Image: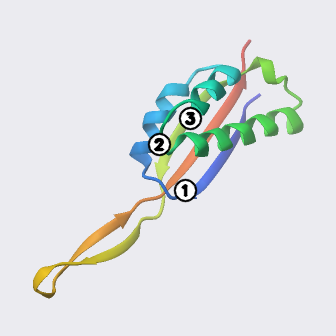
Amino acid sequence: MESFAIAKMQRIAPRKVRIVLDLVRGKKIKEARALLMFTPKAASPIILKVLNSAVANAVNNNKQKEEALYIKTCFASEGQTLKRMQPRSKGSASPIMKRTSHITVILDTKE
């Protein structure tokens, strides 16, 4: 049975999150946690938090064993973009796009 967790409106660009998600996709929970703890990327603590939430959902709500779980699917979709302006020369302005992510982690048990 699948269990999942979603973190919405995280203030990091989805392309940066996808790099770290590619590292842990398909791994067992213990191995994924070790990778996330020692990966020096800004997205690692956020993904670790979502992973721990998904594991808690699987153990508490669906009565699954933590040792049997693995990351079936994980993805980052683009959230709302915060638009800001940067003043430039001659009274003009340049846009600054502050991107957000919706991070989803889906777990399943090994058969």
Of pointers 1 and 3, the one earlier in the residue sequence: 1
Q: Name the residue under label 3.
A: 74
Dot 2: few (<14), some (14–19), or many (≥20) neighbours within 10 Å?
A: many
- Residue 74 position, x and y percent, is 56, 35
- Residue 23 position, x and y percent, is 49, 26
Q: In this view, does 83 lie above or below 107?
A: below
Q: In this view, does 76 lie above or below 35?
A: below
Q: In this view, does 32 lie to the left or right of 82?
A: right
Q: Amino acid under label 1? A: Gln
For the residues carrying marks 1 and 3, which lies nearer the camera in this image? Answer: 1
Mark number, residue 81: none
Q: What element carries label 2?
A: helix
Q: Mark 1 points at which residue?
A: 10
Q: Mark 2 points at which residue?
A: 17
Q: In this view, does 23 lie to the left or right of 73?
A: left
Residue at image location 69% in from the left, 24% down from the top: 29
Q: Is mark 3 on a helix, strand or loop?
A: strand
Q: In this view, does 3 lie to the left or right of 97?
A: right
In three-dimensional space, the C-alpha distance between marks 1 and 3, rounded to whole angstroms, equals 15 Å
Q: Quadrant of residue 81?
A: bottom left
Figure coloring: rainbow
